[in-house]
């Protein structure tokens, strides 16, 4: 637990969130500013700053995170039409919260992966 990390505080129950799925090692909750009809953040309960750090430090936990994201996609009915799973990482990746999180987005065609220009 990192006391200054907003997602650690959600895991600890100190900040409210709309939780859609919880496992021993992961938590999934709705993004507070959704960019698509379905926009869910899937995080590890343990604090890792980003997906690269997590992947090296604890590959099994990285697998838990992907399995949780796949479960949530299924439960939200996104498997048929498809969805996007995205890890913003670092400054150029546009990461704002330094606690690893997958954005699960879906519910409409999401368009091109990047806005160019
Ligand atoms: P990123 O830019 O990849 O770090 O994304 C951080 C995401 O966290 C943004 O989409 C925010 O809308 C979302 N967010 C920030 N605070 C909260 C919160 N308290 N509950 C749910 N989502 C949040």
Image (cartoon, helix red, strand yellow):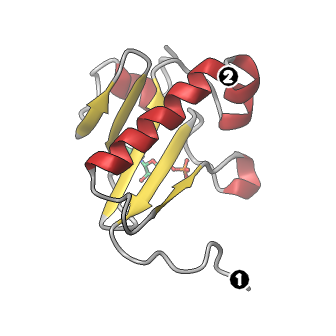
Q: Which residue is mark 1?
A: 116
In depth, the one of 41 and 3 nearer the eye is 41
Upstream in the sequence, badge 2 or badge 1? 2
Q: CA distance from mark 2 to mark 1?
A: 33 Å
In depth, the one of 117 and 6 nearer the eye is 117
Residue 31 image point, x, y percent = 35, 50
Identify the residue at horizontal 57%, vertical 48% (top origin). 96
Q: Which residue is mark 2?
A: 59
Identify the residue at horizontal 50%, vertical 24% (top origin). 4
* Crowd class of label 2 (few under 14; some 14 to 19; many from 20; radius 10 Å): few
Q: Is residue 22 left or right of residue 46?
A: left
- The relative height of residue 46 versus residue 5 in the rendered view (above or below) is above
Q: Nearer the viewer, mark 2 or mark 1?
A: 2
Dot 1 beta carbon under 8 Å from ligand 1: no
Specify whether residue 44 is in view: yes
Residue 87 image point, x, y percent = 61, 48
In depth, the one of 67 and 50 nearer the eye is 67
In depth, the one of 74 and 1 nearer the eye is 74
SS of the residue under disc 1 = loop
Identify the residue at horizontal 30%, vertical 67% (top origin). 37
């Amino acid at each position: 637990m990192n006391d200054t990390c907003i997602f650690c505080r959600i895991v600890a129950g100190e900040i409210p969130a709309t939780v859609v799925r919880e496992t021993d090692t992961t938590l999934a909750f709705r993004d507070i500013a959704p960019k698509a009809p379905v926009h869910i953040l899937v995080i590890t309960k343990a604090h890792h700053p980003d997906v690269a750090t997590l992947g090296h430090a604890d590959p099994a936990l990285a697998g838990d995170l992907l399995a949780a994201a796949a479960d949530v996609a299924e439960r939200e009915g996104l498997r048929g039409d498809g969805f996007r799973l995205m890890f913003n990482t670092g400054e150029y990746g546009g990461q704002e919260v330094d606690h690893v999180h997958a954005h699960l987005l879906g519910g409409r065609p999401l368009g091109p992966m990047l806005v160019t220009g």
